[in-house]
Image (cartoon, rainbow, N blue to C red):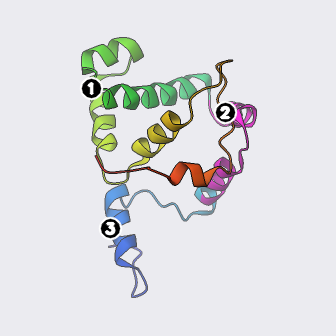
Amino acid sequence: MRGMNDKTSIKTVKLVKQIGPDMDWNTRGNKQLLAGVLALRNEDEAKRFLRDLMTPAEIKEFANRLETASLLAKDMQYNAISERTGLSSTTIARIAKWLGGSLGGYRLILARLSAFPRQSSGQIKNLHHNHSKLRKGLSLST
C-alpha cells in the first residue's frame, strides 16, 4: 500500500483500508481541521466555526446526512427519509453503509447525542470535556 513502511502498524493498515487510501488525515491541513473541531467548547463556537467554514447549503447537507443516519437507526424507510431530507436514495444508501460500517463515526455521534438530551430551551448541552460520561455503556457494535 502506498505510503507504508516497516513501522506501519497493522491497525493503521486496516484503518487506511476502511477509510480509503485517498483520505490522508496526516496532512497539515487535515490535522489543523481536526484540532479546530476538537477545540470547540460550546454550541455558539460550533455555529460560528461551521458558518465560517461552510456555506449555508453545505451546513444543510451535513445536517441532513446526520438526520438521515438517525432516521436509518430508527429503521425509517428510504423513501420517507428522502421526502423528509431531500437526499437522494444513493446518498441515503451510502449513509446506511457508513452507519453499519466498521469505523462507527455515525454510531458514536448518535450514541453521544442520545446520551445527552437537549435542554428544555432546545439548546444542546455543553458536552465538551465530558468524556467519562460518554464512555460508560457506549457500544459501537451494530
Amino acid type assigned to the residue bearing label 2 in the image: Lys
Determine the residue positioned at 46% across, 24% down: 64
Residue 99, position as x, y percentages in the image: 33, 41
**Taking 81 as reference, is 128 above or below it?**
below
* Residue at disc 2, secondary structure: loop
* Residue at disc 3, secondary structure: helix
Residue 136, position as x, y percentages in the image: 49, 52
Magenta-span inclusion, residue 40: yes
| Disc 2 crowd, CA 10 A, few/some/many (<14, 14-19, 20+) | some
Residue receiving disc 2: 125
Determine the residue positioned at 66% across, 34% down: 50
- Range of the magenta residues? 31-54
The label nearer to you, 3 versus 2, is 2
Residue receiving disc 1: 75
Amino acid type assigned to the residue bearing label 3 in the image: Lys
Question: Label 1 vs label 2: CA separation?
Answer: 26 Å
